[in-house]
Amino acid sequence: MYWQKDIETMPISALQALQLQRLKEMVRRASTSSYYQQLFQEHGVTVEDLQQIDDIHKLPFTTKQDLRNGYPYGFLTVPKDEVVRLHSSSGTTGQATVVFHTTHDIQDWANLMARCMYMTGARKSDVFQNMTGYGMFTGGLGFHYGAERLGALTVPAGSGNSKRQIRFMKDFGTTILHIIPSYALHLLSVFEEEGVDPKTDLCLKTVYLGAEPHSEHTRRRIEGALGVKAYNSYGLSEMYGPGVAFECPEQQGLHIWEDSYFVEIIDPQTLKPVSDGEEGELVLTTLTREAMPLIRYRTRDLTSVCSEPCACGRTHKRLSRIKGRSDDMFIVKGVNVFPMQVETVLMSIPEVGTNYVIELDTEEEIDVMTVKVEVQSDFFLGDVKGLKALQQKITAALRSEVLFTPRVTLVEPDSIPEAQGKAVRVIDHRQQH
Amino acid sequence: MYWQKDIETMPISALQALQLQRLKEMVRRASTSSYYQQLFQEHGVTVEDLQQIDDIHKLPFTTKQDLRNGYPYGFLTVPKDEVVRLHSSSGTTGQATVVFHTTHDIQDWANLMARCMYMTGARKSDVFQNMTGYGMFTGGLGFHYGAERLGALTVPAGSGNSKRQIRFMKDFGTTILHIIPSYALHLLSVFEEEGVDPKTDLCLKTVYLGAEPHSEHTRRRIEGALGVKAYNSYGLSEMYGPGVAFECPEQQGLHIWEDSYFVEIIDPQTLKPVSDGEEGELVLTTLTREAMPLIRYRTRDLTSVCSEPCACGRTHKRLSRIKGRSDDMFIVKGVNVFPMQVETVLMSIPEVGTNYVIELDTEEEIDVMTVKVEVQSDFFLGDVKGLKALQQKITAALRSEVLFTPRVTLVEPDSIPEAQGKAVRVIDHRQQH
């Protein structure tokens, strides 16, 4: 039931003692990087200031911008020839960032991933089809190494080529998928086209949904159509990648591995901690990383933390479903909107299909939000009255969520282009934003 | 200088003794698979028939068609839950094939790759940019694991996105590339566009060319433009993938690792062995594989073997540059042509650019071969007379190689679409072939 029982069920006091010890070690190590050396000096903090775990508040935050400023070697704490892997962002939205790993880090990461997968029932007898891109995207190699550590049979399918993916599932008796949620929704329509009923024709039992925030309705829809349990995976490349937090079979939040990460939730405006259960920005400190420790890293992901005991027996805190990244938020008519709010509404309506996109425009200096929604194929072939009624139903549901009236356009199935990798949910045509 | 000196420089008699011992073990193991059990029975052979290494000729060949017939589990010799990886062909040209690996196999493969890379001077201080696709393509994960075993810094760049690739080379001081030769040629023009001189602006010293047969002229062109030594890598997914044979710094053929593979060259018609130095089809027997031993596998690759001592001190035989796969050969006007013959001619002409394609048509029941050739950009902007002369020069050079007159069309740089992955060199429009 547990991959590492002693760690996963460690009493909270022991866990906190371990965290303090590791935090000190991390700060000591971080101080040897050129970037933190200077940052800690500027803030006048040293490892001696850490007498108890709450003293972490004395340390400065690290931001994405810091990573950019320190690019490429500013955060490195080991000689370059000790580094065996790097993962770099694309740099399409500004200066790129990079994260380095030693052999220890790669093994540590694989172990965390194996822990996540084992928690959901994955064993060496499983057949694991890894349906995300490999290479720089940390989701691909992250899960790949975890499955290998577990000893499961890994099918390194990579992304795309849905028909071939389905053939692999059939031919090799795939039991577990790792897939991006928007692609999972798309795959449902390919199953239909191919005349494959995933519930009876395949051996699937578990799906890992990663890399994109997604709604509970999206999860339930995927679970229902595939006849599986779908688990939420959370991570970010600034940490190792996936393996930061993962759902247990209770599906009541994602256990964040506190032996490896110190978790804080802050108010992104005041930067003060918020209470248990209150939403804010997730801040993470690595506790075991060798090549590149990060101290109080502001993830920009919005969530809340729950410290209540979990029925699964694990003592590690749980994160609630990620609402989105603060960067993803957009403002329409003065209202803050997260794409996840729109998705939650859409996926709760059964007639809605598997893809959608939000377009933002300015008309006569007024913001207009248009939501293009694919409709289920059965329903789309029905009468016009039904479509009109559906359009009104979606509009009303969205209005009650975002508090202004969006335009809703219904389109036929598969008419919105599929993304390669993470889905693009918002297209902003406005001049200034 | 050697990754495993004892093995790489093993006296030939000792190597042959090791081969015989391992061959027996392999045949014993293979006999436990359902496919070989039956095949060996049909041929009336058992491991007892192997008294000396030449007795391998008593064993039947294994072909691609056998792999198809045995799909998916016919060749497996371990319980399914001992398998940790599979690589499957796309199955676009018929029934798919699949190769399975245990943890031992993955480690064995990584070790062979590390041996290859170390042989060419790669060390843990190197920065290795892996520019091929990951996932099912064995070249990506094969080199990735080898570099990791070596302790080099791996940049898992994956394929495509040339500008980002060049940024990585600059930012991380990449010293070694793994790249498909047709993509390497394409990259030369991107360097030019980006105003980057790879010889002075980068730290490159070594390039591994794999996955496609390519000519010596192609290699020299890449070496000259990048200021590197380029090494030929040979492998096939039916074995582990890359790591079967690799060039040493002498660049006089590819050492085939005889502790892991037993090599034969046969006449593809008579199936009889050919002499040292004589061209024929490469036949390989795995000597260390656990999940899925293959006995006398007909690779369809055409090459010759050289048993002469090599100046590098390694005792393992050398393969000559792969001429092509017997499947790649096409017949025009009754003449057998390999794409490699055309490439060899083209790449020896300095005015020829970085891409070409061969198109085959039928006109009035006669075969026509048209070679579309990109011209170097400087030259393309020159006068028409020069282009006309170049066209005649290429036509004459091709005619003296293939012994009929092809049509040659000169096109401007970058006008032939780049392949994603292996280049498509021959487009056959003929009705029957």
Image (spheres, coloured by chain):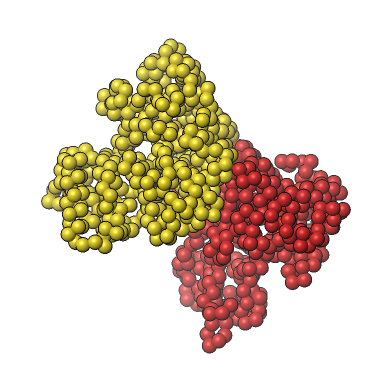
Chain colours: A yellow, B red
Horizontally, residue A4 falls left or right of residue A327, namely: right
Residue closer to the observer: B396 or B101: B101
Residue sitting at the far bottom: B364
Figure check: A30 above or below A174: above
Residue closer to the observer: B284 or B313: B284
Which quadrant: the N terminus of chain B? Answer: top right
Residue sitting at the far left: A364
Q: Residue at x 42, y 60 (%)?
A: A195
Residue sitting at the far front: A200
Q: Is residue A164 visible?
A: yes
Q: Residue at x 79, y 41 (%)?
A: B6
Q: Tell me where residue B183 appears, x and y as whole percent.
A: 53, 58
Residue closer to the observer: B180 or B344: B180
Which quadrant: the C terminus of chain B? Answer: bottom right
Horizontally, residue B103 falls left or right of residue A307, namely: right
Q: Tell me where residue B362 appears, x and y as whole percent.
A: 54, 82
Q: Residue at x 47, y 54 (%)?
A: A201
Q: Residue at x 43, y 50 (%)?
A: A199
Figure check: B45 above or below A177: below
Q: Is residue B191 visible?
A: no
Figure check: B126 above or below B134: above
Horizontally, residue A355 falls left or right of residue B400, namely: left
For the image, the number of numbered tags is 0
Horizontally, residue B298 falls left or right of residue B192, namely: right
* Residue A123 placement: quadrant: top right
* Residue B217 placement: quadrant: bottom right
Q: Tell me where residue B326 appears, x and y as whole percent.
A: 66, 68
* Residue B301 placement: quadrant: bottom right
Figure check: B268 above or below B284: below
Q: Tell me where residue B102 appears, x and y as whole percent.
A: 64, 44
